[in-house]
Amino acid sequence: LSIAEYPLGPGKVPAASASDQYSGVDLASEAIIPDDQLEDVMKMINEVIRPLGDFEFVGSNNWAINGSKSSTGMPIVAGDPHLSFQAPSVWYEAHIVVPGELDVTGTSFPGLPGILIGHNDHLAYSFTNVGADVNDIFVEQLNPANPDQYMYNGEWTDFTIHQEDIQTKEGEVITFTVKESVHGPCIDSVRNTYDSDDETHPNLAMKWTISGATHEMIAISEAMKADNLEEFMDAMYWWDTAAQNCVLGDDSGNIAMLVVGRFPVRAGYTGEYPITALNDSVGMVGYVPYAFNPREVNPSRGFVQSANQRTIAPSNYAYNILGPQADGYRARRIFYLLDNNDAITVNDMKRFQADVVEVRAEVIVPYVIDAWDSVGGGNTTIDAAVDLLRVWDFDMEPDLVAPTIWIYLLNAIHEETFDEVSSVSTSMPLSRTPILEEFIVTDNAYYFDDHTTVPIETRDEILVQALFTAIDTLTAEWADEPDWVYGNRHIIYIDHLASFTYIGGGPRRGGNTIDVAGGWTVTHGPSTRLIADLSDIEVSYMAYPGGQSGNIFSPHFEDNFALWNSFDEVTEQHGYHTMYFYSTAAAFRTADTDGSMIERTITFVP
């Protein structure tokens, strides 16, 4: 469907055109916080959110192929959302049947009456996070004579003030006084101590699209009942937050990727940084009409995919919806696999979900090898390390040494290239790997030269220096494990929510790969895997790192983990279990001819 073919929301509510909604932003009139205050503001924000823990954009994968790419002539849908691991599992499987109304199976969160990732008898679907920018910080100008007032539209305006009580497990009640401006609650209201009596911070109000009523349960309820793509699109009208890339395929042969969620339309600012908004000319003024959310339906290439990469180029879209997207390397690899394979089977999809090719290394390592051959040499330890990189196929396998070298090498290249901005932090967007890759591939002399020295350093000299730094650091940090085998330290660990036990403890494949496994101790990744073939919807495949039971003494507390974590070297697949789809117990019993499908039967007697 194109925008012209989908002008109305559910109930025939007309959607305004993009030209009606969008007005150019005059950044010259934007009241930007002075540079010397910006660091203090960002520090304050960090202190407020730090008690909530570290936020990590762990991402997800999903894709769908249509009949032109599949072996069956029908769509196949795959999805593996990446979340922090926990025991009991964050997911549980369910099959919900309401005779004549609803028949859907897949995974859900405990307590949620709906299927988030799965299929009904007509379509299959999965989600990844858009990484949208839907949260803004406003700096309020306080009245020096009355701290309960702020400047807005030329006059001192009273904050709305209320008390928030937090009950603790010890029975204590902690009370906070919260002030709210027209922009939202003041987040520094929760901080009641400062480093000194005369310390002050800007008063920061937070505007977030989730602050009001949201309608995700309507979206989920309607999506589960959808018979086709159009009905599913109508259901997703009600999805407010968090913004998602929804991939789906239906039994009419359609595939689509829909960007769903509410995205703010901003006036007078971009939303990238904290902003002073003294009047109503600056602020969130509405939402992007659902009809104009990005989407792709039945593309000629025969597939759609998302891996938290940038959903749409800003130059091709009138609205600013983009936030902290992933670097795009997983998406690049998924695109390559789907684009370069035809007659794709379910087994191929399983193989793709287990892929551990490190695309960053695939691009950067050849330049490092060439640099060593050109201007390096004279160090036997580095010679040996480079030789291991020469023969590496870029798979992040736990029994190899090259992945360990690569991780230290990439960190060293970042440090040697961006050392002059280290005071700002190498986590700044400038130092992200795609920028580094562009510098290396284009041989950007300006950024490789160390401007604090007289000699002009070249790209190859910096890459060689990074090799020395990487091997020196690796040798020191792995002194007790001189073999440097990746799986010795790259292990999976799933902690129990109450710390009663844990799951895992062994080597783990992957890294910044499709089968993601970041960090040395892997605590997040594919929280479930789904593969659904629309040519045979009665049988789909799933696995997740845990079990159906939350009882640590149950045999089903972690029995799925062994399947999920296993890897067959011959088929190049992880394990899956079959997720059967029978609408009645009688049909299930009839299909279970050898007694292998049904473990137990529970009969409820009124």
Image: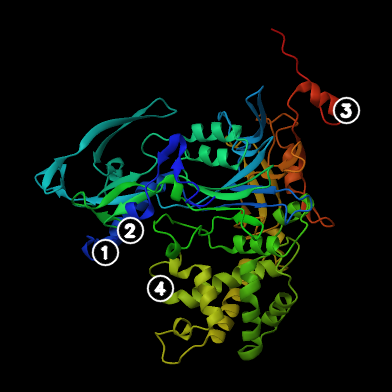
Q: Residues within 10 Å of mark 2 (few under 14, many from 20)?
A: some
Q: Single out the mark in the foreground, 2 or 3.
A: 2
Q: Examine the rendering and report whether any part of residue 599 can be seen.
A: no
Query: Are discs 4 and 2 less than 8 Å apart at CB?
Result: no
Three-letter amino acid code at disc 1?
A: Leu
For this orientation, the residue located farthest to the right is 594
Residue drawn at (33%, 58%) of the image: 270
Between 211 and 65, the one lying in front of the other is 65
Which residue, given by chain and number where applicable, does mark 3 sit on? Answer: 595
Counting residues from the N terminus, which is met first, the one under dot 1 or under dot 2? 1
Alpha carbons under labels 4 and 3: distance apart: 65 Å
Query: Are discs 1 and 2 less than 8 Å apart at CB?
Result: yes
Residue 360 image offset from top left, x and y in percent: 61, 69
Query: Are discs 3 and 1 less than 8 Å apart at CB?
Result: no
Picture quadrant where residue 484 is located: bottom right
Residue drawn at (77%, 22%) of the image: 585
Q: In this view, does 131 lie to the left or right of 396?
A: left
Badge number at residue 421: 4
In this rendering, the answer to whether 287 lies above or below 424 is above
Q: Single out the mark in the foreground, 3 or 1.
A: 1
Counting residues from the N terminus, which is met first, the one under dot 3 or under dot 1? 1
Counting residues from the N terminus, which is met first, the one under dot 2 or under dot 3? 2
Which residue, given by chain and number where applicable, does mark 2 sit on? Answer: 270
Alpha carbons under labels 3 and 1: distance apart: 69 Å
Q: Single out the mark in the foreground, 4 or 2.
A: 2
Which residue, given by chain and number where applicable, does mark 1 sit on? Answer: 27
